[in-house]
Amino acid sequence: MGVAVIGASMTKFGQRDAWIQDLLAQAGEECLDDAGVTPTDVEHLYVSNMASGEFEGQTGVMNALAHDLGVLPAYSERVDQTSSSGGAGIYEAWQSVASGASEMTLLVGGEKMTHKTTGEATDIIASITHPAEYKHGVTLPSFAGMTARHYLERFDAPREALARVAVKNHRNGVDNPNAQFQKEITVEQALDSPIIADPLRLYDFCPITDGSAAMMFTTEERAAEIADEYAVVSGIGGATDTHVVHEREDPTVMGGVVESSKEAYEMSGLSPEDLDVAELHDMFTILEFLQLEGIGVADQGTAWEMAMDGATAKDGELPINTSGGLKSKGHPLGASGVAQGVEIYEQLVGEAGPRQIDAETALACNVGGFGNCVITTIMEAAE
């Protein structure tokens, strides 16, 4: 059964006084309003969230949200796939409608993180890594630093290329009123910022963030009846790579990205050349290169050239992260993949405001851990 998205919302990302239930409820209510759907129309409710128990001591967030939104007796479920929980939520919501189990499915993703110290938050996020790696002090930033150094040396890429990713995404974030950071930076600022995991510096990393985002899914038939503008999920795929990163044949190849995007292309009947815009999981700047190559937009070892020649800018050949990406928009773990979906939906229905580009086909790639699990979604504007 064809699946459509008829509404979306995103709260302000950043440091919020609100707790997880309030953030989820805000996004859910705004999405219901945007879709023009009443709470009693919702048959399935999915909540993408990685660590509300660890961050707040709060579990059962899906049951509480069903109550807060008044969608009872809708089936509710929490979706946890680490930092790709949002993308996994899109997959679950798509499945629920495509299978015929639900005609109206609401997805809400969120995380509350900033009340913890940086060390505490980093420790919670580091629990994603394999215990054999974690006991040696290996964290996601250290993986990123080692991979970045290997990539730069192996493919003779300049350090400036990574800085240009940060500069581009900060520039895009200026036009996103819900982004955590709405300020431009220069290449010089990025290159001179403090080292975090050599060769990666402060501006190569996304921030710790609070926030929530939501999407409403229904059948294409129902969408045509109730919505003036909507987008169609034409392809989606999920894949899992080795949990232990050093077991991969090539650390510069994200196998989960390759396989999930292959599935999405095959389902949609599209190819990388058909894409007009994409949202990629730039938790670290190096990941933008690895994902551009993984989704087939660039050959291995060449994505850095796209950053250098402006091909991924908003006015470039293939705009990447028009939302500001995780780098500027922020990365509230469970919300990030949903927010990616919100951005490509708004681009396709012409609701992206100053970020708007001419787009008929869009892709979102949400990554868990350091490529441990990945969901790639392709959406198209309804004809």
Image (cartoon, rainbow, N blue to C red):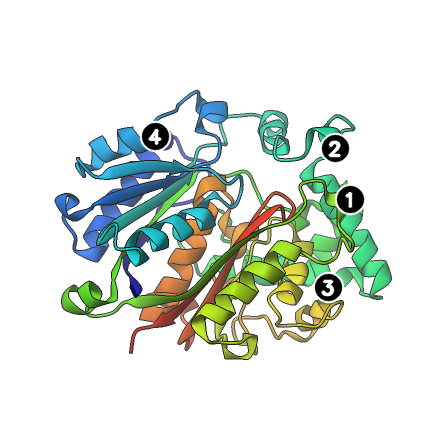
> Which residue sits at x=48%, y=35%?
50
The local crowd at label 4, few if under 14, some if 14 to 19, many if 20 or more residues have their Cα within 10 Å, is many
Residue of label 2: 133
Q: Find residue 298 and report its image quarter.
A: bottom right
Residue placed under numbered mark 4 in the picture: 61
Of the residues tagged 4 and 1, which is closer to the observer? 1
Mark 4 touches mark 3? (CB < 8 Å): no
Q: Earlier in the sequence, mark 2 or mark 4?
A: 4
Q: Distance of mark 1 from mark 3, alpha carbons?
A: 25 Å
Q: Amino acid at mark 4?
A: Val
- Report helix, strand or loop for mark 1: helix
Residue ID at (51%, 49%): 181
Say which quadrant the N terminus sits in: bottom left
Q: Which residue type does callout 3 highlight?
A: Ala
Q: Is residue 275 visible?
A: yes
The residue under label 1 is which amino acid type? His
Which one is earlier in the sequence, the residue at label 1 or at label 3?
3
